Amino acid sequence: MESSSNRVEPVGKKELSQLVSGFERKLERELPLSIGPDLTEIAVKREGLVSARCNKESILKLARLLRDKYGFEHLSLISAVDWRDRFELVYHVRSYANYCMMEIKVPVPKDDLEVYSVTSIWKGANWHEREAYDMMGIVFKGHPDLRRILLPEDVKYFPLRKDFQLAEED
Amino acid sequence: MAEMWINMGPQHPMTHGLWNLRIKVDGEVITDAMPEIGYLHRGMEKIFENKTYVQIGPLTDRLCYGSSFTWNHLYCMTVEKLMGLEIPERAKWIRVMAIELQRIASHLMWLAAYAADLGLLTGFVWAMRDREIFLDLLQALSGSRLTYNYARIGGVAADLPPDFERDCLRAVDYFERKLKEHENLYNGSKIFKMRTVGIGILKREEAINLGVTGPTLRGSNAKIDIRKDQPYEVYDEIDFEVACHTDCDCWARYIVRMTEMKESCKIIRQTLQKMPKGPVRVKTPMLAPSGDAIGVVEDPRGEGMMYLIGDGTDRPYRLKVRSPLFVTLSAAKSMLLGYKVADVVAIMGSIDVCMGETDR
């Protein structure tokens, strides 16, 4: 019943951190060379977490590189954040083999809400992107089925934007 | 024969909650599927932004009625990460124990629902009977049966009640005996096998690409468990196996959940043995600093995750919840294509649907 997995099972905390840190440094070193100036920031946040900031023009290129070359096969989450002067998409992707998670922040200016969809790379992005559209109004270019997901089709507003106020409680 | 669309839901015995599965059929064979969700949307993420950190605690219980403690714990863990708090050792062990009690209760609820879906009413009654014991334990711990609000930012609400270790050990002993009876009931049932073996196949590569996690992924021949890969609380000091099965079908998901319940019993025994004495809660500040934090846990249904942004006030700037079922449901089409209408119930039941966390 038990399958034989080709991954290395971690024995304790120490081995795990040794396994991880080399990989994180490698990302920090190699990604700026491959992506160029569009990758504005990259830093190892802590064990197993690398944080990067990328311009929205290069997100597809970065995503493809991460999946094909570095084994980031699982897209955990896409969160959209309203920073009042701009929107920001935060992608969390995970490499199962390297026990590493990567956080990619993509600023989206308020006057240009179009971002390339990553559904062609991670099919799991489909509903996350629909939710970001539903709640924040960010438009994903190349998405196969960009409709509202949680709210009804005829809703006119984007409720998670900061300028959408809740009614006062009594 | 002409193709047509069928709505299964929002009111349908299969849905276990409120959602709509639209399937396109050619005769009896499914050629397309489109899940529609949102019927239970309460705007949780918007509400979170307008409440203080303390007020949000009880709300996170309502994310999933089947495993409310996991979400409550995930929220507290994420806030602690943002605040940079270190919680007492004993609180960590109590949390792990409660998480595993919750996992068993949640899997038993799934087993009951799945048995009822497939027409094994005996299985439904047995699973609900045994789930009651774990609900009683959690009630003794927290005071309520379903929405516990037991985790607090900085620890847990209270220490274990008197004689809790004894009751807990008795319950685990009893349940390990009963689990064999459960297994005999299903493994020996020809009807159960005919309806699950080889049905709803989801291959490993596709499952990972679709973002599927939890027992559904482990049933697809991937030995991936966050408790092992990114240990939180004290999971790195506990000895347990990750359940995994190679068959990729509904039967594999059933085996994975049964094995996980056994492993949970093992974990509960270890926590009771190794739990140190000491305080269970520390004082916490009202305000959280600016910055962001992520918390990731292994929910009974998959990878539960929260992304929290603080701005220096007593309310979160943004709290995004990753629901495992939200993603697994989007993979429904891949599991359903090519099977018959009668298999829909068996396939959708096997992913353990909980709409509370999906719609938020």
Image (spheres, rainbow, N blue to C red):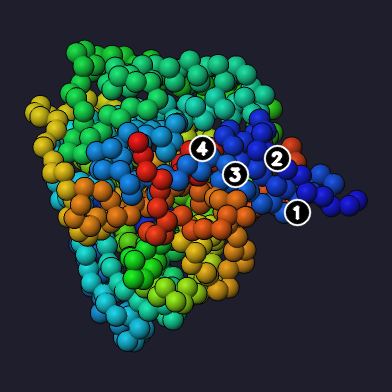
Which residue type carries mark 1?
Thr
- Disc 3 vs disc 1: which is toward the camera? 1
Measured in 3D between alpha carbons, the distance from the residue under mark 1 to the one under mark 4, in whole angstroms, is 25 Å
What residue sits right under mark 1 in the picture? B31
Res. B268 image quadrant:
top left
What residue sits right under mark 3 in the picture? B249
Q: Where is residue B246 shown, x and y percent of the image?
A: 53, 47
Q: Where is residue A55 shown, x and y percent of the image?
A: 37, 79
Looking at the image, residue A58 sits to the left or right of residue B39; the answer is: left
Asked if disc 1 and disc 4 are in contact, CB closer than 8 Å, the reply is no
Disc assigned to residue B8: 2
Query: At numbered mark 1, what does the secondary structure look like: helix, strand or loop?
Result: strand
Which residue type carries mark 2?
Met
Measured in 3D between alpha carbons, the distance from the residue under mark 1 to the one under mark 2, in whole angstroms, is 15 Å
Which residue type carries mark 3?
Asp
User: How packed is label 2: few (under 14 Cα within 10 Å), some, or many (20 or more)?
Assistant: some
Looking at the image, residue B333 sits to the left or right of residue A165; the answer is: right
Q: Chain of mark 2?
A: B
Residue visible at 15% across and 51% down in the picture: B84
Residues at discs 1 and 4 both on one chain: yes
